Amino acid sequence: MSVYKNKQVLSWAFYDWANSAFATIVLAGFFPLFFKQFWSVQNTVTESTFQLGVGNALASLVIVMLAPLLGAIADAGSLKKRLLIVFSLLGISMTLGLYFVEQNSWLLAISFFVLASIGFSGSILFNDALLINVTEERNYDRVSAFGYAMGYLGGGILFAVNIAMVTKPEWFGFSSANDAVRFSFITVSIWWLVFSIPLWLFVHEDKTGEKYSARQTIYSAIAQLVNTFKKINELKTVVLFLLAYWLYIDGVDTIVRMAVDYGLAIGLDGSDLLLALLMTQFIGFPAALGFGYLGERIGAKTGIMLAIVVYLAVTIFAYRMKSVEEFYALAITIGLVQGGIQSLSRSLYARIIPKSQSAEFFGFYNMLGKFAAVLGPLMIGIIAAMTDDSRLAMFSVSILFISGGILLYFVDEKKTVQVAEDIDAQ
């Protein structure tokens, strides 16, 4: 428990608590639901699915293009925390902007959503990289899992309040459920801002010995990126892990982003889908903590493989799903493993990369994670539009879990840790 009481660890974990309000309420919950039923109501079900898939893909593509360079710049200038603040403020302000978007304005809604998603994803890059600054290597699994658990709890609490607002709008002084949904975007932006403050104040980033101008920092970052690519032969196992992560996290992110859209497409009621998402949040809190301890005992890699098998079973079952009770069962199952696969991936990666280049390497990590979020939603959107079959589109995600699991099997953690230590010693 002493690890969790550490001020830096707790402040760092509170950023997961803060930004998970966006991930849960906007990214997975209200935005896809409200987009289909309010902003894009004039379009068909498959057309709105395509628009949402393209919007998710575009936001992810921007991060794909920027992440490695941003990470290298953060390492060169010790700017991880400062850049986190910049991107989080972008996400917060654009989320607030969704409140002002009128009905049938699907293009404006997608534009705000894309910018908010860029802010969210960019800030996550630097938050992940700060893991090595807040705790020792032996605590990576536990602290990473603690962050995700805090995220599930924080996001779940605000989500519960917002669902109550939407279900009983008159209790909160709203004239309709639509007004309550729109106001929820304001609550997310306030929540995200307030609970980011502990990290801004109390997490300390290791500083480089030299101070650089902005131009020197960028030049140094580019030189470091070039140097990293030259050493890529020494880091083959890191590359193999990144490819595996790219594939299986594609499946995870796609399910998060498209689950509500899928439920609506097969005829389930929106309120039931939101309740299922809420269940996932509160189940995810203890489950993520449990996976942190599991990772310490059986190894992070084995824990990830276990989660991949569960996700594969979920996608197969989802193909034939017909009732809301089955959707609830899937939500519970996902809640048991979602935080685990995310947290153990982060801690395993932190262990196998050079600590002196953490932000740069987490730039590659987030780049591939977000590039996966380009392909997954886009794949679902295109297959749904071409075949008019949402079930087949969702079933295609199983390919990503199978291929990702096969590549992860060949990752040699011990060998890669030694190579990373050698690079740090140079």
Image (cartoon, grey):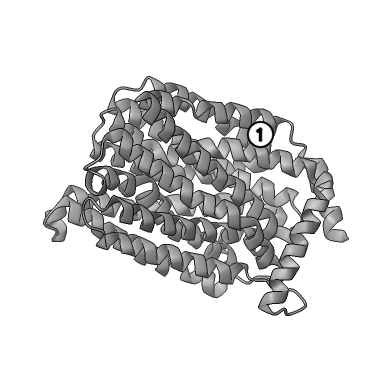
Q: Nearer the viewer, residue 184 or 223?
A: 223
**Left or right of 66: which side holds 228?**
right
Q: Secondary structure at mark 1?
A: helix
Which residue is pictured at 68% across the width and 48% down the height? Answer: 349
Q: Position of residue 201 (x, y in %)?
A: 53, 75
Residue kind at label 1, given as amino acid type: Thr
Question: Is 340 above or below relative to 213?
Answer: above
Q: Position of residue 113 (x, y in %)?
A: 38, 55
Question: Is 259 above or below relative to 165?
Answer: above
Question: Is 159 above or below relative to 76?
Answer: above
Q: Nearer the viewer, residue 131 or 70?
A: 70
Q: Residue furthest top?
A: 320
Quadrant in which residue 328 is drawn: top left
Question: Is 75 above or below relative to 181?
Answer: below
- Quarter placement of the N terminus: bottom right
Which residue is pictured at 66% across the width and 77% down the height? Answer: 214
Quadrant in which residue 131 is drawn: bottom right
Q: Residues within 10 Å of mark 1 (few under 14, many from 20)?
A: some
Q: Position of residue 29 (x, y in %)?
A: 34, 46
Which residue is pictured at 49% across the width and 37% down the height? Answer: 376
Residue at the disc numbered 1: 302
Q: Position of residue 158 (x, y in %)?
A: 33, 55
- Quarter placement of the C terminus: bottom right
Q: Number of numbered discs present?
A: 1
Tell me, yes or no, if residue 297 can be seen here: no
**Left or right of 319: which side holds 309?**
right
Which residue is pictured at 52% across the width and 26% down the height? Answer: 398
